[in-house]
Image (cartoon, rainbow, N blue to C red):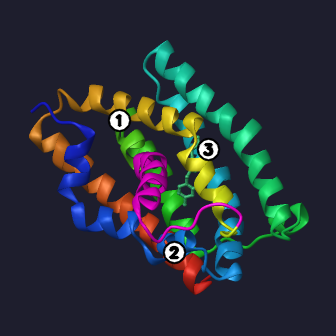
Amino acid sequence: MGYRFTDLTAACQDDWRAYIEHDFVRQLGQGHLADDAFRHYLKQDYLFLIHFARAYALAAYKSPTLADLRQAHEGLKAIVDVELELHVGYCREWGISEQQLAELPEARATLAYTRYVLDTGNRGDLLDLHVALAPCLVGYGEIANWLNAQPDTLRGDANPYDAWIAMYEGEEFQAAMHAELAWIDARLADVTPARFDALTRIFRDATRLEIDFWQMGLDGSD
Ligand SMILES: Cc1ncc(C[n+]2csc(CCO)c2C)c(N)n1
């Protein structure tokens, strides 16, 4: 007993590295990711964010305390009022209109990942749901930090994806990531080994679905 978040990543180290260091991420960092791969990713990510907002609404429903309810409410507001607006603006810069976003067919990788998270939250409790969301929240912060540690990562105007890296290395996002880590660490401190194994399965599934999401971007698959 006395588990921490790092025990989850350690328990599925190969999948976690395959997610953080995926070819999509490497190519984005080096600035030579194909435009169309990034556009496909951006479009599907719009749908992903909508379902992610629903997952925060589910977290509100699953909240046993006022503090948890407030946290879920803040997360939902941040996605609906800020992130989705930013995303729509970012898509526009990449030539994707709001009309196009509204009419998008959902790719299988998006369907699989988002519905998996919602189903896990429905079946389980608030900790199950947070663990299903963790690869998304914590992973993107770690990806930005990993990219910054690579000598072949290109920063500034020379890299068309610089703004993407900047968003996730930014103070605000990194602070949200650390708050989530602290929340999960506090909950994991007193789970049993059997419960930790069950949470590890959720974390691994969600991490593998993140890998599929990157691969969908590279392959342009629907
Ligand atoms: C497939 C996919 N996975 C993770 C993220 C990152 N992300 C989405 S919502 C959110 C938290 C916002 O409060 C974060 C970090 C993404 N955009 N797309």
Please state which amino acid type lies under the numbered disc 3: Arg
Please state which amino acid type lies under the numbered disc 1: Leu
Whether residue 176 sits left or right of residue 4 in the image: it is right
Please say whether residue 102 is visible from this viewpoint: no
Q: Ligand 1: does it lie within 8 Å of the C-beta at label 1? A: no
Marks 2 and 3, the one that precedes in the sequence: 2
Please say whether residue 63 is visible from this viewpoint: yes
Pick whichever, 163 or 189, lies toward us: 163
Instruction: Give the quadrant of residue 3.
Output: top left
Whether residue 105 sits left or right of residue 191 in the image: it is right
- Tell me where the magenta segment starts and ends, as one range: 133-157
Position in image of residue 59 (x %, y %): 51, 34
Position in image of residue 173 (x %, y %): 56, 39
User: According to the image, label 2 marks what residue?
Assistant: 24
User: According to the image, label 1 marks what residue?
Assistant: 127
Quadrant of the image containing the N terminus: top left
Please state which amino acid type lies under the numbered disc 2: Phe
User: According to the image, label 3 marks what residue?
Assistant: 54
Position in image of residue 8 (x %, y %): 24, 48
Marks 3 and 1, the one that precedes in the sequence: 3
User: Is residue 47 within the magenta segment?
Assistant: no
Whether residue 219 sits left or right of residue 90 in the image: it is left
